Amino acid sequence: MRTTAGRRIELGGFGSGPPPRDLLLILAVVFATYSATFFTALLDWLRLTPLVWQRGMVWQLFTYPFVGVPDAVATPWILLELLILYWFGGEVYRTLGRRPFWELLTVTVLGAALVAVLVDLALRLGGGLGSGLPLLQGQRTLLVVFIAAFAVLRANATILLFFVLPVKAAYFLWIELAFAFIAFLGTKDLAGFLGICTAIGLTVGLLRPGGIRRALREPRLRFERWWIERKLGRMRRKSRLHLIRPDDERGGSNGGSNGGSKGSGSGPWVH
């Protein structure tokens, strides 16, 4: 079933169309790293840890969501997590497109990691104990971002959760926060919990109309206009040309008979 507003959606019933190759690659990497974790500890260097600020391992800020988080023993639960990632991630990818999809993932992943690392640093400097950031790892972060994005993009849709319970998609934001808080109570991972909250907040801010994307767009446009004006100013000074705007030229055409021939053009005149 399609995920149009006002319709009921059974998980697994939406996401028409061919599977996005980018998403399939993400799922393959997560499963491969999840499997490799049972054979080697080298992948721990790619997870998010306090080593980011202790030893400058800044690459962990970007790699951690793609390293699958294993359980104490291998269980089929990872397959269900990957399936949920496919359901929600596929719909988000098809709605946004490739470039916005990766922009969303990059901003949320990096923002969540920075907040978590800074909170961990503050706790340790304050005499507290670090938690190792277990909540903000691997497919868990991807699940948070994809489900939050779906909740924003399809806020009015109704999902039959577990194929039985109808839940409005917008409520998934609060459901995610509730699950994260319960996990925090069990792990005492304050840095990871705040990182998850950051990922959800950034997702909402980036995807809702008038959110972070618009707030960032206006300063960028002002800077581009300022830069173009400065560049044109340097060009005028070097060439000693005077740029007359079309409005000024039309105004000057009213002052004499010679102005009409110049003011008839639609573009600016250069003297």
Image: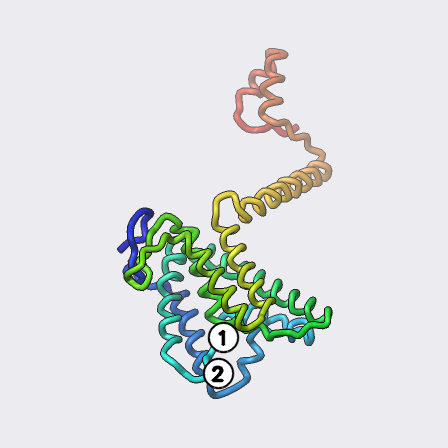
Q: Say above or below: 122 vs 69.
A: above
Q: Which amino acid type corresponds to the residue marked 2 in the rendered image?
A: Thr
Q: Residue 56 in the image: x percent, y percent?
A: 67, 73
Q: How is the image coloured?
A: rainbow
User: Where, quadrant-wise, is the C terminus in this rendering?
Assistant: top right
The image position of residue 151, as x and y in percent, is 42, 54
Task: Give the CA separation, mark 1 to mark 2.
Answer: 9 Å
Amino acid residing under circle 1: Val
Drawn side of residue 117 relative to residue 138, left or right:
right
Taking the image as shown, residue 248 lies to the left or right of residue 7, namely right
Q: Which residue is drawn at 50% across and 69% down?
A: 183
The numbered mark, 1 or 2, whose residue comes first in the sequence reads: 2
Q: In which quarter of the image is the N terminus?
A: bottom left
Marks 1/2 in contact by CB < 8 Å: the verdict is yes
Q: Nearer the viewer, residue 229 or 10?
A: 10
In the displayed structure image, the side of residue 195 where residue 151 appears, left or right: left
Q: Residue drawn at (68%, 71%), measured in percent from left and top? A: 53
Q: Position of residue 203 (x, y in %)?
A: 50, 55
* Residue holding disc 1: 67
Most extreme residue toward the bottom is 39
Residue drawn at the location 41% of the way across and 71% of the way down = 27
**Dot 1, how many residues are within 10 Å of its Cα: few (below 14), some (14-19), or many (20+)?**
many
In the image: residue 76, left or right of residue 36: left
What is the quadrant of residue 128 in the picture? Answer: bottom right
Say which mark, if any, is on residue 37: 2
Q: Residue at x 53, y 72 (%)?
A: 186
